[in-house]
Amino acid sequence: MALWTSFLDRNLYFLVYLKGLLKGGFGKKYYSQWGEDIVVSSIFSAKKNGFYVDVGAYHPMHYSNTYLLYKRGWRGINIDPNPNALMLFKWHRQRDVNVLSGVSEKSGIKRYYIFNHQSCNTFSTEQKELMLKKSFIRLVKETSVECQPLHKILDKYASEKTIDFLNVDVEGLNLEVLRSIDWRKNMPRVVCVEDENGISSFMYSKSYKLHSKLGQSSIYISS
């Protein structure tokens, strides 16, 4: 029984992916967890060839806030420290740039915590402890991952791009990701970020206004 549980924990990410393909579950009208992609798509209803950046992208379709835009002809950059995720992105998002990296305010090596439910993966020790209080969450492994500020990734892959939509969901360190942007160079029109302390005041300080709240996500539009 323990071996079976260990197998499921380590492979749940791919099992969810296979289940979605077999059931046609990814052929939906929306893909995000709380309907964020519907709201974002409506904001950009007249824009056919936009550009997005997805930090903590997790999966090319499941819980994705950018796949609906991709299906409309958009392209962008998907960033995630999980090699399993990047493999699926390379299969299903071939127009996109897919980057295997963590994002932090300063470049360096960070400890990365990987769970059986990999949407909960995090660099945050505090977030790890919160996750482990849930009965269905189990830590599969810990590893060391190279991290870099978002402005470095954007300078490398999007130096001549206008970012229409930025999505940030990194489980406990969203504010750190936002602080790693050079806002003088990159001012996305719309930002979707998972709520945590300090997010709203930071976004207001960058001249954004709250457009909507959906589940744990807030969507901001530059003013």
Image: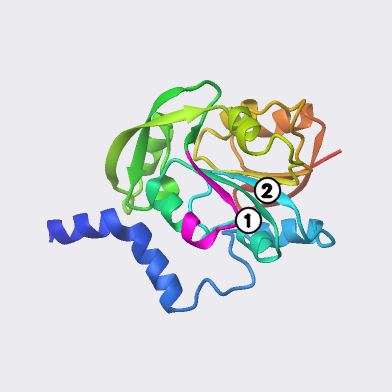
Q: Which residue is mark 2?
A: 52
Q: Specify the farthest residue to the bottom.
A: 23
* Residue drawn 49% across the image and 22% down it: 107
- Rendered residue at 38%/69% (across/down): 18
Helix, strand or loop status at disc 1: loop
Of the two numbered discs 1 and 2 on the same chain, state the one appearing first in sequence: 2
Amino acid type shown at disc 2: Tyr
The answer to whether 109 appears left or right of 213 in the picture is left
Do the residues bearing badges 1 and 2 touch, measured as CB atoms within 8 Å? yes
Q: Determine which quarter of the picture holds residue 145.
A: top left
Residue 76, given in percent of the width and then of the height, sits at 64, 49
Looking at the image, which residue is at 72% across and 29% down?
201
Q: Position of residue 183 (x, y in %)?
A: 74, 28
Decide if residue 69 is in sight here. yes
Please name the residue that numbered disc 1 is placed on. 66
Looking at the picture, which amino acid does disc 1 mark? Thr
Q: From the image, which quarter does the N terminus lie in?
A: bottom left
Foreground of the two, 61 or 219: 61
Q: Is residue 90 magenta?
A: yes
User: Which residue is more in the foreground, 104 or 99?
Assistant: 99
- 41 or 80, which lies in front? 80
As displayed, is residue 80 above or below residue 102? below
- Residue range highlighted in magenta: 89-100
Q: Colour scheme in the image?
A: rainbow
